[in-house]
Image: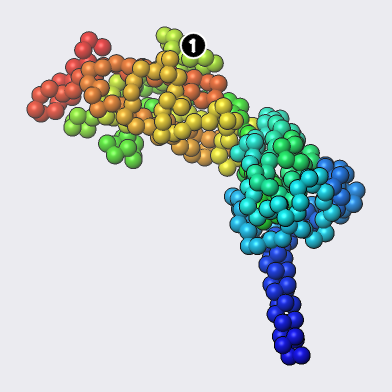
Amino acid sequence: MKKVVKVLLISLGAIALVAGVSGAVYGSSSSLRNWIEKHTTTPTVTDSSQASSTSDPSEDSSQPDSSSSENGSSSENNGSSSENPGSNTDPGSSQTPGEYDDENCSISLSTNHIYLRNNSLTETESDEFSASIEGNPSDDRLVWYPINGNILSTSKTVTESEETLTLSASYFNTTQYVRVAMVANPAIYEDLPVTYVNNIKSSQFLSVGIFNKAGTSVQASCNCTSYEPSAKTTTWTDHDGTYFFSEKIYRPNDRWYGNPALAMEQGCMLEVTASPGAYIDFKGRVETYKKADTPIFAPEYQFNGADYTTFTVSEYTDINFASSYVYYQSYADLWDIHYRLQLPLDFEGQTGTVVLKLQDWYYAIHFNAYHGVTSLNGVEENVDFGGN
């Protein structure tokens, strides 16, 4: 009898362990678990409007608990069963249950970032997107869960693998996330970032200047702050091989132009002279449709600040800059954008042009030839501009 009791206790303990591990996986996010249970009570539910008829709308904006990530994805599984409590699924497969594997699956997304675009900043709808399950799940459906249901809403709550849906929201200035999880195993999910594009409304060119050799502090700057003739030229030298000169910057020099060819026309292009290796800083000011944490560009306007070819027009740029750097500074309700470009170390006596690109606006700068000081005393009068 004691032996029977012992075996029975061991069996009950094993069952409890399996149930406990399965419950830990499924309950890793109570809000996600509730979301799945609420929207997968019948296999025919495929959109949020159908789901809402049998659910409490107040639960839609619930936040995931601290055990789930809001930024990233997780495919960790701690041992889940192929059945989900509270769900009644019918995957419609001819496979036997023993062939299913809900633990070794992954989710593949059709896009890695959702962009909402609407310059009027009213509610807008995204392009279509989808997700698919790689593997052999017992249920090939996916559930879509906005991390913040007060901001984001999806056109469908439950989809089949590769079925498309859209997302909509009013304007927000931070990145939000929508989570897509397997119905068969909620521990496998992906978090998809959502960004509201806040395009540039207007732009202005402010100044050009030179930084020290380390490229960390400004030495001289020619600002576009007044009309001709009060605008002034700027000349600077450290008498150690570094030189900078800029002509007057005044209207209409302060404007960005609608195409690069127009920016290259005489009277539009800025004239600058600088020595080899000099760090030149070009500053513009932009107004976005609404002040945000940073200007958020649409994908076709994004660039890499460390690669000047991504924010210049190659057709009109004939200088191979030694390095580049782009950063923003907040200015009241506007943003100042800095393009910092280092001239080539072998730029002695050479000329060249660069056309900066800012969304659909362009600004051209021509570099005149510079010939370094030839005397030993470093007197500025010995600078030869080669007839310029």
Res 314 visible? yes
Seen at 42% across and 25% down, the residue is: 309
Residue 218 horizontal/vertical position (percent) = 34, 36
Residue 104 horizontal/vertical position (percent) = 63, 52
Quarter of the rendering containing residue 387: top left
User: Is disc 1 surrounded by few (<14), some (14 to 19) or many (20+) residues within 10 Å?
Assistant: some
Residue 153 horizontal/vertical position (percent) = 76, 43
- Which image quadrant: the C terminus? top left
Seen at 54% across and 25% down, the residue is: 359
Judge by depth and name the residue closer to the eye, 296 or 140: 140
Residue 187 is left or right of residue 238, and the answer is right
Residue 71 is left or right of residue 207, and the answer is right
- Which image quadrant: the N terminus? bottom right
Q: Residue furthest right?
A: 53
Circle 1: residue type = Leu
In this rendering, the answer to whether 159 lies above or below 128 is: below
Seen at 69% across and 35% down, the residue is: 129
Q: Residue furthest bottom?
A: 2
Residue 301 horizontal/vertical position (percent) = 55, 27
Q: Secondary structure at mark 1?
A: helix
In this rendering, the answer to whether 67 lies above or below 374 is: below
Judge by depth and name the residue closer to the eye, 106 or 209: 106
Count all numbered tags in the image, as a single digit.
Answer: 1
Image coloring type: rainbow
Determine which residue is flagged by label 1: 262
Seen at 19% across and 29% down, the residue is: 241
Res 183 visible? no
